[in-house]
Amino acid sequence: MLDELTNLTMDLIRIPSTQYNPDALSTCADYIGQYLDRIDAAWLRLNHNGVPSILVMPRTGKVPVLLMSHFDVVDAPDPLFEPRIEDNKLFGRGSIDDKYAVALSLILVKKHLHQLRQNGRDQSDLPFGILMTGDEETGGTNGAQMALQQVKADFCIALDGGGLDKIVIREKGIFRLKLIARGKSSHGARPWLGENAIEKLMRDYFIIKGFFFDTDSNHWQRTLTISIVHAGKSQNQVPDYAEAVLDIRYTEQDDMMELIGQMRSVIQGEIEILSTAPVFSSLPSPFLDHLLSLSPKTVTGSEHGASDARHLMDHNIPGIVWGADGGMSQHSMNEHINLNSFETLYQILDQFLFRLRT
Amino acid sequence: MLDELTNLTMDLIRIPSTQYNPDALSTCADYIGQYLDRIDAAWLRLNHNGVPSILVMPRTGKVPVLLMSHFDVVDAPDPLFEPRIEDNKLFGRGSIDDKYAVALSLILVKKHLHQLRQNGRDQSDLPFGILMTGDEETGGTNGAQMALQQVKADFCIALDGGGLDKIVIREKGIFRLKLIARGKSSHGARPWLGENAIEKLMRDYFIIKGFFFDTDSNHWQRTLTISIVHAGKSQNQVPDYAEAVLDIRYTEQDDMMELIGQMRSVIQGEIEILSTAPVFSSLPSPFLDHLLSLSPKTVTGSEHGASDARHLMDHNIPGIVWGADGGMSQHSMNEHINLNSFETLYQILDQFLFRLRT
């Protein structure tokens, strides 16, 4: 079984389906569609603003459990699109984020469909659906956000985070801010006649940084990253404008609008809100208890990054984020999946879904 | 006489001879050449790396006094290339920096040549030469630096700074530095796993700023301007690289290499030297005393900006920087020359040069 999981994941890794390569994204969706055709499954290809997603459901609209994954990946140098196995790990872009989960979902559909048909039943008796989207890495607004409108599910497992030892039941939200400083330009030889916007930006940044504390060893608190700065045009001029992008991750403890109001009241410059994403917080569900009973070493916990699980909130679907182990190597040059965890996860989910049948 | 000075300056202002418009630079040199042809003066057009300069000398190689000016200007919106007169001021790009000085030089040549010829003498009896260059605003390496190799002068007046009340005998030098900070990249949701290069850059900048003090009311001390910052590629990533341009102006009091060594020893990042210009400091000359005796309200002083006068040092030519009054409007939207000062300057220089004849 591990070979089948691994081979399918490797095929998917070879397709460089990044946001910068729409053709490859489409090719990846084609590949998935052809796989589903081969196992004679009915499926739906969605398309929003050029982003393809694929949905497999027992019947339209209603399902006990939905498995969600994504086949878009973040950009990488070419060698990362050639998968390799070493030390019982599969390396390559998308190995843990998130093509293994696409392969896992497809093979679960294949197996359960086969078993159902052996018993004279068909796809309409499938106790789960799978959704594979093409834009998780860029926010999921054309993938999960749109596709979930077509799905009624009692429970969703976003196979895109956590690990065998941890089911993620909450993820931080995001506030992306633009910090703007305005000064007064002057010749670089006479700085006392100007006001340097870069210096003002730096001072404002350190004031804003005062709103963030790294006191929790689990880091379950708001964090601040200054990710981009652009300022100044001419080497011999005091610049009158500077701007920076701030990436804030926050928890259910934070009232972000109040916090931004406080920041605005103490800095000299301006704050613009570029984009936001809500905190994901799992709604209670008997399916989660069921899953934990099948995997006694697994506990629930939190994750810092955001995922498409955020869109479950909008659609009132109880859900969790879970997955195989990759040593937190997502997005890195060293991205990999631990193959033992891949197989174990498959077995647990297989069992979990099997018990939903009857 | 003022009309002639003003009209010629206005003609020159209408030619947008910026570094970004080599055709206009060439047209401006053509215009000057045609003027010199009309007054039947011998002249030389130099060209280095596409930068034109024009030199008028009594005879090759040797002259008591050289008047130096430049016809390149800094960039400006179109309306600034249409000169206008208001409140006895002439407005427009280049009015004070430095096309009035080109016009002044040309008209002085015209007048003295005419007087000499009336007395049966010719250009070889001219007691001064004029040099008009095309790249002062970008450092003068292809203009003044090259042309001065062809000139032996006892004294040079760089008509490009100061004012009727102040002859500039020293100008600050320049060190342009690149400040580089290196960190460790991580996902923006997990900043504790990375080292933010932008923050490091900011901390290094404030450390470097500690080497600068604004204690002298004349500002005759080194100054620091952070003029450009570029850092970060992705909104959700802790950046591993950040860089800034620092524009340092220094005086004869500063040992810049020692200072940079000290900076390097206390910052975390790196300093690269992008470019330098020496301090200009006038060598003693009886010509300066002569000039001061003709203009009793004028004192000697310093200026913060650098000019082509820096190149006099390399060629061992004693010299000063002097000029008409423009209310420090060089490079601004409001650039202008005070027309009374223009006429007065002309009269003083005319008298000064007249006394050199005999």
Image (cartoon, coloured by chain):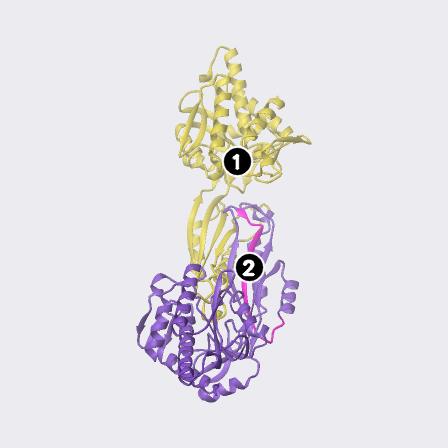
Chain colours: A yellow, B purple
Q: Percent position (x, y) of residue B217? A: 50, 78
Task: Tell me the SS state at disc 2.
Answer: helix
| Residue A208 position within the rendered picture, expressed as x and y whole percent measured from the top left | 49, 57
Secondary structure under tag 1 reads: loop
Residue under mark 2: which chain is it in? B
- The circle on residue B202 is 2
Q: Is residue B241 magenta?
A: yes
- Residue B327, visible in the rendered structure: no
Prevailing secondary structure of the magenta residues = strand
According to the picture, the residue beneath numbered tag 1 turns out to be: A73
The quadrant the N terminus of chain A occupies is top right
Number of other residues with Cα within 10 Å of mark 2, as a class: few under 14, some 14 to 19, many 20 or more: many
Q: Above or below — where is B125 with respect to B272?
A: below
Q: Which residues are drawn in magenta?
A: B237-255
Say which of A158 and B97 sits in front.
B97
Q: Position of residue B203 (x, y in %)?
A: 57, 60
The crowding category of the residue bearing disc 1, from other C-alpha atoms within 10 Å (few below 14, some 14 to 19, many at least 20), is many
Residue B1, by quadrant, is bottom left
Q: Amino acid at mark 2?
A: Met
Q: Amino acid at mark 1?
A: Val
Q: Is residue B248 above or below residue B285?
A: above
User: Can residue A139 be seen at all in this image of the molecule?
Assistant: yes
Q: Spatial distance from mark 1 to mark 2, Cα to Cα?
A: 33 Å
